[in-house]
Image: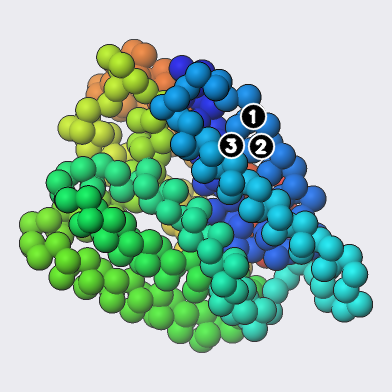
């Protein structure tokens, strides 16, 4: 894999991990040391990027600013926790009221919004290219996609409370569904085309795969670059495989992250074992779509995705009161 591309990919991988848990980890005093270490790793990766890679200079500046912002937030929270006289300042589990407050925190919302924008730019780049939007239309479509994503992130935080009664959890689930439907209605009106909206719906159903394919595509260049048709075929194959694989607990479905009925150490470890087997089966299918160099890069991308998933799940497990590993 091209070293320049690898450094950029690793940087983005850290950002993806931050985006998945920053809403919870950044406000958990017991997790701040881990956050410092992650930010330090991000800064080190950025510092070692070759300065001759002009094509990625803007990205490097962006990620460095994000790391500095996160570090500043973490330092402020650590100082506040250290000087607090409230014993609850160091607890790991949030109440519903605390999680609702987190979701309304403007500073935190800005951090999450920035991280989600980075993810969406990778996940939905192929969709935006397919729609052939004008620059201002592309910007507006990205805005709509971010608004939809923030519905899931903000309300999803509240579902992390393991003491949340079943009726309140169900109500939050309905609220998320209604919010997503409302955002889709805005996208439908904007696209003003049933055909384009149908393509968007299919694409959105493949969101985990589109993120994976987008990150994989960024690791390729030159003769091995991934063309749009192959990207579509690969994402569809991955989506079909995920939907038919007999996971005991499917943590590709992020709704399980906040469900204490299924989120525990045993379930996480079993999923990680099953994910390895699932990815091996997927790689065999991918061999029919990719050339040898692309396939090797695809397998490297799978390994990185496994590690990132493990870190993500264990962080969320610790945060919800379980035992991460």
Choose top left, top right, bottom left or bottom right for residue 195.
bottom left
Q: Position of residue 159 (x, y in %)?
A: 55, 73
Does residue 138 lie above or below 214 as drawn? below
Picture disc at residue 43:
2
Discs 3/1, front: 1
- Say whether marks 1 and 2 touch (CB < 8 Å): yes
Q: Residue at 84% of width from left, 67% of height from top? A: 81
Discs 2/3, front: 2
Residue 181 visible in image:
yes
Badge 3: residue crowd in 10 Å (few <14, some 14–19, many ≥20): few
Q: Secondary structure at mark 2?
A: helix
Does residue 112 lie above or below 175 as drawn? above
Q: Position of residue 281 (x, y in %)?
A: 39, 30
Q: Residue at 20% of width from left, 57% of height from top? A: 137
- Say whether marks 2 and 3 touch (CB < 8 Å): no
The answer to whether residue 133 is left or right of residue 16 is left
Picture disc at residue 47:
1
Q: Secondary structure at mark 3?
A: helix
Closest to the observer: 273 or 236?
Answer: 236
Picture disc at residue 307:
3
Q: Secondary structure at mark 1?
A: helix
Q: Position of residue 199 (x, y in %)?
A: 16, 53
Badge 2: residue crowd in 10 Å (few <14, some 14–19, many ≥20): some
């Amino acid at each position: 894999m091209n070293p320049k591309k690898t450094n950029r990919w690793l940087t983005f991988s850290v950002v993806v991990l931050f985006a998945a848990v920053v809403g919870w980890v950044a406000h958990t005093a017991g997790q701040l040391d881990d956050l410092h270490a992650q930010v330090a790793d991000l800064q080190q990766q950025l510092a070692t990027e070759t300065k001759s890679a002009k094509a990625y200079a803007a990205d490097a500046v962006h990620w460095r600013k994000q790391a500095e912002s996160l570090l500043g937030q973490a330092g402020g929270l650590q100082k506040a926790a250290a000087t607090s006289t409230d014993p609850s300042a160091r607890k790991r589990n949030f109440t519903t009221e605390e999680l609702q407050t987190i979701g309304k925190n403007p500073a935190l919302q800005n951090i999450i919004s920035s991280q989600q924008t980075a993810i969406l730019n990778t996940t939905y780049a192929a969709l935006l290219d397919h729609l052939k939007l004008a620059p201002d239309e592309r910007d507006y479509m990205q805005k709509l996609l971010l608004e939809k994503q923030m519905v899931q992130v903000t309300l999803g935080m509240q579902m992390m409370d393991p003491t949340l009664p079943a009726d309140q959890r169900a109500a939050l689930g309905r609220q998320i569904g209604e919010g997503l439907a409302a955002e889709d209605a805005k996208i439908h009106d904007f696209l003003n085309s049933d055909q384009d909206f149908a393509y968007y719906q299919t694409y959105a159903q493949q969101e985990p795969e589109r993120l994976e394919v987008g990150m994989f595509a960024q690791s390729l260049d030159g003769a091995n670059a991934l063309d749009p048709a192959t990207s579509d075929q690969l994402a569809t194959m991955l989506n079909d495989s995920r939907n038919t694989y007999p996971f005991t607990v499917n943590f590709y479905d992020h709704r399980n992250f906040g469900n204490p009925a299924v989120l525990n150490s045993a379930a996480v470890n079993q999923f990680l074992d099953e994910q390895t087997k699932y990815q091996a089966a997927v790689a065999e299918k991918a061999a029919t779509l990719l050339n040898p160099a692309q396939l090797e890069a695809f397998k490297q991308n799978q390994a990185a995705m496994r590690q990132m998933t493990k870190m993500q799940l264990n962080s969320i497990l610790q945060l919800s009161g379980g035992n991460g590993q």
